[in-house]
Amino acid sequence: MARVVLKLGDDVSTDIIYPGRYMATVLPTETPQYAFADFPEFNARLKNGEIPAGSVVVAGKNFGCGSSREQAASTLKGHELVIVAKNFARIFLQNAINLGLKVVVCPEIEAEEGDELEILPDKIVNKTSGKEFRVEPLPAARQAIIDAGGLVPYTRQRLLEKAASRKKS
């Protein structure tokens, strides 16, 4: 079960997620401190460790629109947040997959801050409201990258598997 810790609307830009004024800081170990910096109360809760890994941010359509900065995805990954949105901006979605950020496409999602969600492969159950919402699964190859923790761990895993199968031959 995961709790909704932030509800946002449509067209949440990368500048809202990771404001451009912090672009001098691009290391994935440092970017999380600037997640939603213009939401000072939420940002403080993140920085103080008050929001547990696996907590959910719910958004409307076009989450991650705007620039192509991958820091918007890395800042969220740094807090191990799960992003459930009606849909995602194309470049943000690819950056999220490459970094292993858990993203869920749920076109009809209805949830409020504080709601408890059960996220299943084919649906999301809002335990607070009792409603269920269909999930649009990502292609298997993209989901495998997220499940591995990102493109680098996925590639490493595949290379190790290939090397191990060669040794057996």
Image (cartoon, rainbow, N blue to C red):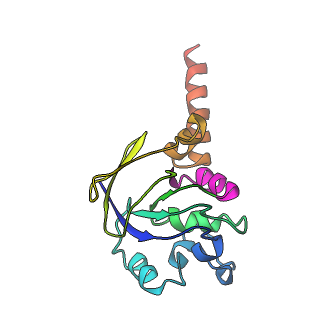
Q: Which quadrant: the C terminus?
A: top right
Q: Position of residue 4 (x, y in %)?
A: 37, 65
Residue that protrudes farthest toward the right in the picture:
67
Which residue is at 59% across, 41% downward? 142
Let me know if residue 26 appears in the view: no
Q: Residue at x 46, y 63 (%)?
A: 58
- What residue span does the magenta drawing correspond to? 89-105
**Front residue of 136 and 129:** 129
Whether 98 is drawn above or below 22: the answer is above
Farthest residue toward the top? 169
Identify whether 66 is placed above or below 125. below
Where is the N terminus found, in terms of image quarters?
bottom left
Q: Which residue lies at the image location 56% right of the left edge and 45% below the top edge?
A: 153
47 versus 57 height, above or below: below
Q: Is residue 66 above or below residue 163?
A: below
Q: Is residue 86 left or right of residue 14?
A: left
Is residue 3 found left or right of 39 in the rendered image?
A: left
Q: What percent of the width, then of the height, locates residue 65? A: 67, 65
Task: Name the residue rendered at 47%, 86% in the picture.
Answer: 40
Q: Image check: 73 left or right of 120?
A: right
Q: Is residue 103 magenta?
A: yes
Residue 10 among those drawn in magenta? no
Q: Is residue 114 left or right of residue 34?
A: left
Residue 101 in sight = yes
The location of residue 104, given as percent across then percent down, is 50, 51
Q: Nearer the viewer, residue 147 or 24?
A: 147
Q: How many marks?
A: 0
Asked which quadrant contains residue 89, the reply is bottom right
Q: Return the x and y of residue 82 as percentages of the image width and height.
A: 45, 58
